[in-house]
Image (cartoon, rainbow, N blue to C red):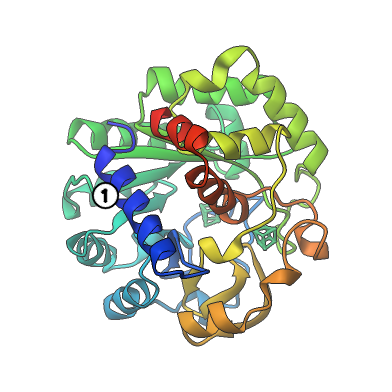
Amino acid sequence: MSVPWRQKLAVGWYITKQRLRRVEKFPLVLQLEPLYQCNLACAGCGKIQHPQHILARRLTVQECIDAVEECGAPMVSIAGGEPLIHKEIHLIAKELVKRRKFVYLCTNALMMQRKLDLFQPSPYFAWSVHIDGLRERHDESVCRSGVFDKAVAAIREAQRRGFRVTTNTTFFGQDDARSIRAVLDFLNDELKVDQMQIAPGYAYEKAPDQEHFLGVERTRAIFREAFAGGKRRKWRLNHTPLYLDFLEGKVDFECTAWGIPSFSVLGWQRPCYLMADAPYAASYRELVEETDWSRYGRGRHPKCENCMAHCGYEPTAVLASTRSLKESVRAALSS
Ligand code: SF4
Ligand code: SF4
C-alpha cells in the first residue's frame, strides 16, 4: 500500500473544513519530538547538540496527546532524537492512532526489530526509516558502519509483519543525480517500501559537518537531473507533484512554516523544527497567533536562505494543489 485513500480523503476533507470555517492558519502535520536523545551522532544532525539535562528530558504520553489535540493536525510525524529510545513510545503511537491521527514514526532503525512487537499494523500507522543512501553512503552519513544493513533487515521484518513502511532520505553535498537515483531505485524496486520522502539537508548551525549542505542552485540542478526522463513518476514519493516541481526549480514558493508546527520537550518551536529563532511558545495558539510568520522563508531571513525543506515548502505545495483542479487531480493520481 502507498498513501491509503483513507488518508488522502481524510486530509482533503480536513483542509476543506478549515477553509469553510475561514481558518487562515492550520496545521497539516504535527512534528512531535518527545526526546532529543539519540543512539547515533550523524554528521548533518542539528538535534543532538543540546546539553545533557535537555537530552535526558522526555515528553509524557499525556503531553503528546495534549499537543496533538490542541493543534488538531490530521497527521503526526514522531521524530527526535531517536523516538524508540523513549520507553513509552508505543503508548504514544497507540493513543494517537486511537484518535485516528495518521502517525509516521521516524527511526534510524537500530532498535526497530527489537521493538516491533510493541506496535500493531494499522492504516493509521507507518514506520519512516532514515536511509540516506546505499550501504556505503548511508553508513558514512550516519557516521557508523553496519547501520544500513540493520535498517534494511528491520524494514524487511516490518513488511513481513504487515506494517506500512516508508523511508526518509536527506541529501547532502556528497550526493549527485546518480546517487539519488540509486537509492530511490533500491527503495522503490528492491525493498518495495510503501513510500519515500526526500529532502535536501537543512544547514543546521550546530551540525558538526558544515561543508556538505546543498545550496538552492545545486539542489535544483541535482534533482532536475535525477528526475529527468520521467524517473520521478515511477517512484512512490510521499510528496505532492508541486513540491517535486519546486525541488527541480520549475516553480518557486514561499515558506508556510505554520503548516508543520513542531512540539518538543522545549515547547512549541518557532518558526519550524529546523530553526529556533525566537523563544518557544507555551501553547499552539500562542505559536500561531504571536509568531511573526512574515519574517521567515528564503529572502526574508538569513537562516532560511538555503532552505528547501518539506516542512516549509510542502505545506505551500499542498495548499496550492487543493486550490487548482489540475493539481488536485495530479496529486490524487500520484503515489
Ligand atoms: S539518527 Fe536522526 S536524530 Fe539521531 S543523530 Fe542521526 S539525524 Fe540526528
Ligand atoms: S525557510 Fe521555512 S522551513 Fe526553512 S528554515 Fe526557514 S522557516 Fe523553517
Q: Where does the image place residue 82, in percent across and percent down from the top left? A: 44, 58
- Under mark 1, the amino acid is Phe
Near-viewer residue (9 or 79): 9
Label 1 beta carbon within 8 A of ligand 1: no
**Quarter that holds the C terminus:** top left
Residue at image coords 74%, 51%: 209
Q: In the displayed structure, does residue 159 sit left or right of residue 110? A: left
Residue at image coords 46%, 69%: 22
Q: Is residue 75 visible?
A: no
Can you tell which quarter of the image residue 88 is in? bottom left
Q: In the displayed structure, does residue 99 sit left or right of residue 218? A: left
Near-viewer residue (87 or 253): 253
Q: Residues within 10 Å of mark 1 (few under 14, many from 20)?
A: many
Q: Identify the residue under disc 1.
A: 125
Residue at image coords 46%, 64%: 27
Q: Where does the image place residue 193, in percent across and percent down from the top left? A: 36, 30
The answer to whether residue 124 is above or below residue 268 is above
Residue at image coords 29%, 64%: 89
Near-viewer residue (282 or 42): 282
Q: Where does the image place residue 216, in percent across and percent down from the top left? A: 78, 42
Q: Secondary structure at mark 1?
A: strand
**Quarter that holds the N terminus:** top left
Q: Where does the image place residue 298, in percent across and percent down from the top left? A: 77, 56
Task: Count the marks.
Answer: 1
Can you tell which quarter of the image residue 224 is in? top right
Ligand 2 quadrant in view = bottom right
Q: In the displayed structure, does residue 315 sit left or right of residue 124? A: right
